Structures are given as C-alpha cells and as structure tokens.
Image: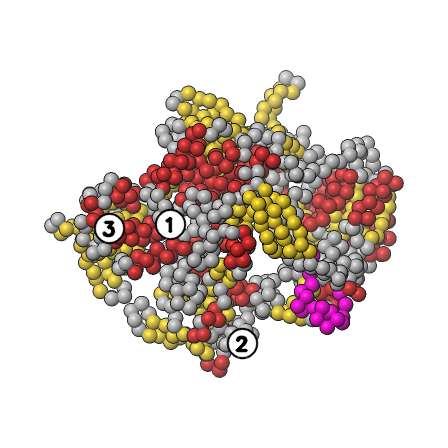
Amino acid sequence: MNIELLTLSELIEVSGEEGNFSVKVRRKPRYVDMGKCIACGVCAEKCPKKVPDEYNVGTAKRKAIFIKYGQTVPLKYAIDPAACLYMSRGKCRACEKFCPTGAIMLNDKEQILTFNVGSIILSPGYRPFDPSVYEFYGYKRLPDVVTSLEYERLLSAGGPNMGHLMRPSDGREPEKVAWVQCVGSREIHRSGNGYCSSVCCMYAIKQALVTKEHLAGRESEQTIFCMDIRSPNKEFERYHEDARARNVRFIRSRPHSIDPGKNDTGVSITYATVGGTLVTEEFDMVVLSIGMGASADAKKLSEITGIELDPYGFARTVAFDPAATSRKGIYAAGGFMAPKAIPRAVTEASAAAAEASRSLSAAKGTLTKQKEYRPERDIAAEEPRIGVFVCSCGMNIAGVVDVKELAEYARSLPHVVFVENNLFTCSTDTQNLIAEKIKEFKANRIVIAACTPRTHEPLFQDTMREAGLNAHLLEMANIRNQNSWVHQSDPVKATEKAKDQIRMALAKAALNVPIESLQVEVVQKALVIGGGLAGMNAALALADQGFETLIVEKSDRLGGNAWHLNETWKGRKVRPQLETVISRVENHKNIEVLKRAEVRSASGSVGRFESDIEVDGTVRRVKYGAAVIAVGAREYEPTEYLYGTDGRVMTHLQLEARLRNGVEDFKKANSVAFIQCVGSREPERMYCSRVCCTHSVQSAIQLKELNPEMDIYILNREMRTYGMREDLYRKARELGVIFIRYYRDRKPDVFTEGNDLCIRAFDPILLRPLKIFADYLILASAIVPYDNQAIIELFRCGHNEDGFLNEAHPKLRPVDMSVEGLFLAGLCNYPKPIDEAVAQGKAAAARANVILSKTVMQLDPIKSYVTDRCDGCALCLDVCPYSAIALEEYEKDGWKHRRIKTDKALCKGCGLCAATCPKRGVLVHGFTHDQLEAQVNTLLDVI
Amino acid sequence: MSQNFEPVIVGFLCNWCAYAGADLAGVSRLQYPPNLRPVRVMCSGMVPPDLVVSALAKGADGVLVMG
C-alpha cells in the first residue's frame, strides 16, 4: 500500500536537493491494463509472434506479449512493441480479441511523470559480460560454448529443457564439462575489467556440483579452469572443499583457446599447466564464467543525477559511508556499486534505506496510508452458514473444470446457503458482490474456489473484513494452480478433483472460528550490544530516527577493532573517521553508552524485550523493542611459524601498530615476507577470513613505497582480492612484490639460521625449493569469534560450527536473526572489512526501524494456543524450534497443576507442538487437528 | 491390480515450500496425474502422525507429507 511500483520506467531528470528532489520519470507503454490483467496467459498462447526469450538468454522462445518469468512482480503481461505484429505491420490484434478481461490497450501511450521525493536510491544492477570480444573462446561460433547464465537456464527445471541437461549441438547429456573462470574479469586488455567479479568462482562450483547431481550414477567429470578459487564468504570454503572431495577437478590455468571438438560437437581446450606443459583436452561442452560489468544505464544515470562513477563505471562510494554517492540525498545499493553476491546486495539495500530515511525522519509517517474497517460481527452463537464462490478465471478454470457442475454440486453440500459462479472472483465488482451476498444470506463463512491462497487470500480476507466478518472465516479451494492448470488434458478427472477440493474446503470452513488479530505494544527503544564500528553505525542510524538507543560495550572504550587498523583498503586513514563516529555517538542526545557493561539476562520478545545490564557490578534493568548484536571478533593468536618466540614474526595487527609508531625500522629492511591463511582454511577452521589477502597486499604496497629496493614475498594458497581490491593485487605485482603459492599439505617452514630468519618453501611454478631470508615475517592471521556462549544462550541465537552468529536466511535476510526483533552486524557474523561492517550496521538499524517506527505492531495471527487438555507433560517444549513454549504452575481447587504457556510473539505457527502433543493440549489457529481431520475424512468418507 | 487403478493420494503440503511449489507447477503448466488431494498446512511438522495412519486406514492409497 505504501509502495508504488512503476515498471517499464526510467529516470530522465533530477533537480532540487536532499529532502526536496523533483524527479521526472518516463513511463513506457505496457499496452496492458494492469488493473484488468489477471495473468491467465491466453494472450501469449494466441500471440503468433515468437522471439528469443531474454530470460532464458536466448535458449528458448517467448511471444511478443509476455511475462518475463513465472514469478514476475507484478504478475502482469506486457507487449514488446518491437516484436508485436500489430505495432510493426498494423495487423493481428489476436491478444485483444482473446483477452477475457479486456485488458489489452493497443493505443497505450508513453507518459512523463513528475514526483517530489526527499531521497533517491539507485539500484540499477549490473550487466552480464558479453564474451564475444574474445574470439579465441569461440562463443556464438561453437554451439557447445555457452555462458554461465545460459548454462544456468539449461540446468533449471523451469528452463528451456525442463531441467534435462542437454548440450546445444546435439542434445546429448554432457558428461565432461569445463568451466573457464575470469571471462571478462581480472583482464585489462580486451574487456578492460581489471576487477574480480566476486561471484563466479562460487557459481561455477555450484554448477559443477549440480551437473554432477544431474548425471548421478554415471561417470562424469567437471573441470574448473581458474587462476585462484575465491570463496571468501560464509560457508563458502566448506562448499569449495566439498567440491574437491567430490572430485570436481580444479586446474590452475587460463586456457588461451577453445577450438571445435571432433565432428563439430564439443570443444577442444588447449591450456598450459602450472609446470608449463601444454595440454590439449576434449570436453563435451564448456561454460564461460562471465563476470559482472557496470550497469548499462550507469553512465546515463550518473549524467542525470550528477553522481560520480569509478573508472570501471560503478558508483563511487567510501568505506565509512558505504551507501552514499557523491551527491547528498542520493544513495546506491547492489551491483551498481561493485560486483557482489546476493547477501551483500540485500544488506546494502537496507543500508541505503537507513540513509534515505535518516534525512526524512522529521516527516516520518506523514504520507503513509492505513485502512479502516467496520467492527466484526459476532458469530459465536450461529450455526455455520457458508457462501461459495466458484471462479471461472476467464477460461483458466472453466476451460478444464466444469464450473457449472461444480457450482451445482456445491449447492448440495452441508451448511451451504448460496453458490455463485463468477467470471473473475477477484475483480473489484465481485468484491462488492461478495459483501452484498454475505449480508443478504447472513452468511458467516465463505469458501472461494479459485486460485491459490498464497496470492489471493489477503484480497479476499480484506473483503471479509469490509463485510464485517473475521478474515479467518474464509477458506480457499485451489482449483486453478493445483488443478485446472496441471490437468489440462483430463477435464473429467479435474472436475472430480475440484469437487473433492471444494468439499474439503467446506469441511474445514465449517470449523473455522474467528481468530483475533495479534498486536504488541512496541517499546520504541533500541539496544545495541557491542560498540565497534558496526554497532556504533547501527546506533547512530537508530538515534537519528529519534529512537532512544543504548549501547552496551564490554571494554572501556568504543571503536573495537577499528583502533588497530591504519587505512581502509581504499587508502583512507581510519583513525580520524573513527574518532568522528565515536564523538557523534558520545554526543548524540538519543544515545547512551554503557562501557565495561555486559548483558546478564534477556526476556520477552519482539517489541518488548527486557534485560539486566551489569555495569561495574551494579545491575540496571532496561526495556527495548529491538536489539542489534554486534559483538565483534578478534585476531587469531598463531601457534605456528615461530610466532611468540621470535620478535620479527608478527601478525597483521602488530605490523599495523609498529607502522603507526614509526616506519624507520621497516625502511631499512631488505626483505619482508608474508604468510597467508595462518589459522584460516584449516580442517578445524574451514573458512576464509576474507580480509587478510587484501591486507597483506596493501601492506606490501606500503612497504614497497617506503623502500622500493625491499624484497617482498607473499606466500599464499590463493590470492582472494575480491571485487575492486584486485586493482591492489595488480599494483603490488607491478611494484615487484613476489607471490609464491603453497599448498595446505606442503606449508612453508620457518626457522632461524644463526641470527637470520629463514623461510623455506616450494615454488610450484619453478618446481624447486626456495629459501627466503626475511627481516620480518608477517602472519596473515585468521579472524576468530569471541566466546559468544553467553549471548547465544541469552538470546537463543543461531550460530554456525565456527562460532559465528547466524542470520535468519543467508541470502535474503542477511541481517535479521531467527528470533524476531534481533538483528546482527559486523564481525560476529563473519569476518569482513570496514565498509561491509558499516553497511551491515546501518542495514541492521533499518531493519530494526521497521519494528520501532510503530507504537503497535501487528503479528500474523496463525499461532499455537493451549487448550484445557494440556496437563503439563512438556513434550512440546523440546520440539519448539523458536523456544516459544514455557511451563507454568497454577492452582485449581487447592491442587497444584502444570501446563504450558506459549509466547505469541515468538511462535511462528509451525505446529510442531501440536503434532507432538498426545492429547490435543496445544493446537494451531486455523490448522487444528479437527480441521485437518475434517478435510481427510470428508475426502475419504465418500469413496 | 487392474489397469484402471486410480489411487487416492492425500498430500499434506507445507505452505512455504511444497504448496508454493505446487502453485508454481501450475504457473509453469507442468502436467501431472489428478490423483493428489492437497491439504495445506503451515509446516509439514504440524501433521499429526495419527492422521496419516487414519487416512490410510480409511482408504487412502497413499499419503504424501511434503515440506
């Protein structure tokens, strides 16, 4: 209700300033009335014009009137004017003729719209790289050379081959597939894309494993040609190791040419091995792992909005303000700023929302809309009187199911007081009809046999409420998605099934009772645990929205790990900016900081938590509606490579500290070595610490600049300078930093010889052992979580096997925790650099803002409830995944009894308790044992 | 067993995955035999085991719990 979606639209002009922009938008014609289109697909079925389907990257066809894919939002058809026969030749109009709702508007015109807005967020995405520039890869010339996006469609169950893996040349299943990495990434000559696209290594591994599953039980071989495998995100390294264990072959090489295979099918790839031998190998097909390029619209957008782009065409941002562009009031998110995977894009979107709403906080809520309903009729004393609406959905249902017969049948069933058949039950006039009929027949329950409740239940529930009935007195029978659409060739059996479905819905509806809407009063205050950069940024974003925010910091100063860092990877000094943030936090009227403080207890749930905070031995009780957990992590203390016994061996943070105290020692050094992955990517810590490769490269550059004569060696397992950080890696190589690869089973050896610090390593390219004399050895030590056991137990946090706190969903809810009202940010979630920690802090604040901005919060009313049959056996306590059930004692007739009580705010209505309970002592609203049983019984009784 | 045997299968479909998947099969027009009678549940974990048994006892030829 508060989002207006303009599709087929582009920004053409921006004027004004932060808080008061005027934007002009060009809306291109859709030629389809969105209010009328019901996405039945008849138009596309009748449309005679076929064109390549962009979504299936040309591997399939679509019509001139089309939806991009089944999950399109909004699910409305559109005409592609370039393909439409009527637009180009003035003849056809088939869609118009057959559309059952009259939604086609062939005279639709372009519109220019003007809006007044306070903030602008730009998220135009990225552009997949077109590999045609590399003629030696044979793309478009050889049929069995495809891009990774095309291959993704070939693998997909919704793709052109319905998930049957077939190679393009002859339709055979490819048993031997190769992936070529870095196509359009890490390459400055043809593509000009010097950066790493960050996502291709992981998607290639995923595609290799999915391919293996497609060919399960057969001999198959998947080979990935790569320079480095970069899997520096949460849980990625384990996935990478798993792929190796399952025999995905990784070859360190960048093939220089792809030639036709035998009989013009498949390919022949020539590549050089690490040792320098040239090999030619045949493959059934090859997938080019294409990178991400700057959005095609980026340049235009930058001209229109006046924001700056980086040399690659991505939006320019800074680490301490990662959502902001160069123009005040305009923010950015996602692939527009740099190549990245979904979790970061989603996090950045929330961070941009936090920034965009910060400057608008004074006007908060002034333009939002809310609907009013009439009071609900009390039906407690009434017998069930059920009204039935059978929807034809144009021909979508009526074309298969005999709706007249179905309506007649419904009339014969118990409790039914009227039956209506409508062309479209979801249309606006039918909503009025439903309300009238409810009044006329004094109906107290409604069954709608139509499409799926997953899309249409909210609409009909709204109609119920407008008619003065509780929303949950509605039941739907899904006779379209789960019947007429999937049984098109068997109308008789489909009609039989529809009768069963309607009878089952009626049986359930007769048992439906009103369900009270659930509300909690929100304590509009926030708690932030941890005063590092992530926590402080979360607190500032919340406090700027006007919410009282309490920061609980364990140590005696704010700032956390940022105190130990000298520069961001983009070379900006950390301290001045950190000090600015700290001073803003300490002087903010809405922020209170408790140092040397720890959370001792936590109770309550979303909207109304309570905790005891201990500060210097005294305990204080606080109430809050939402909390951000940002408790940080620390540098691993190495036990290897003479650390702790030789003063010349130090960690990254110790190097930073020594450089802060003066660079003279290092200026005089002749040789400095770095060893990567110290403590990371080991069996007991199977994750990549994400920041260390960039940190080493950056330190190496700094040392080289201090003394260009200095020899610098970086011993690494692979360099993971993801995204734009690749520029630093290239610069380091240009400056003469020497990179030597080692393997986990053949690590470098560090020892002393007289006074000399020596490193012995094996060079896999030279195929010989090396001995390096180093004045200093820097260990790129892992990032490890603190012992978070207390926090985990207090807040019932999910965590992974490494001890990092878990998000509710790794891709789509990256800053929410599984307990509603709790959010997380920073290193406690996973190792990350400053810009990502700050973005996550802001994102967590934006998500908490959704809860805190209302005085009363509506909860989904489908929850468990306790009946008087509960005898307190407590079997359900352990199965509840949300810890929403507690045991309580009460007295009745002088006897002590036990029973359970459920916390409605924690309960998600999954009903594990109900299925576990042997005596129906706990049930779920709308899905009681009786309601499920009634459906099964009515189905089977008549057989 | 006769050639015309048409089993009755009761399907308990989780609203968030299996039921959504069945909806998407519809949007994608994937055709399958009309023998399944779907019962929507909010989680496959809420299906009472005794209901599965009683469905079979009352004549269902199969019960699918999908989630």
Mark 2 crowd level (few <14, some 14–19, many ≥20, 10 Å Cα): some
Residue furthest to the front: A16
Q: Tell me the quarter of the picture where residue B32 sits.
A: bottom right
Residue to which mark 3 is pinned: A706
Residue to which mark 2 is pinned: A169
Between the C-alphas of marks 1 and 3, the distance is: 18 Å
Q: In the picture provided, is A663 more to the left or to the right than A795? A: left
Q: Chain of mark 3?
A: A
Mark 3 crowd level (few <14, some 14–19, many ≥20, 10 Å Cα): some
Query: Residue A249 location in percent, x, y?
Result: 40, 65
Query: Label 1 near label 2: C-beta < 8 Å?
Result: no
Query: Residue A256 location in percent, x, y?
Result: 38, 72
Marks 2 and 1, the one that precedes in the sequence: 2
Highlighted magenta segment, given as a residue range? A75-95
Q: Is residue A871 visible?
A: yes
For the N terminus of chain A, the quadrant is top right
Residue A475 is inside the magenta segment:
no
Query: Label 3 near label 1: C-beta < 8 Å?
Result: no
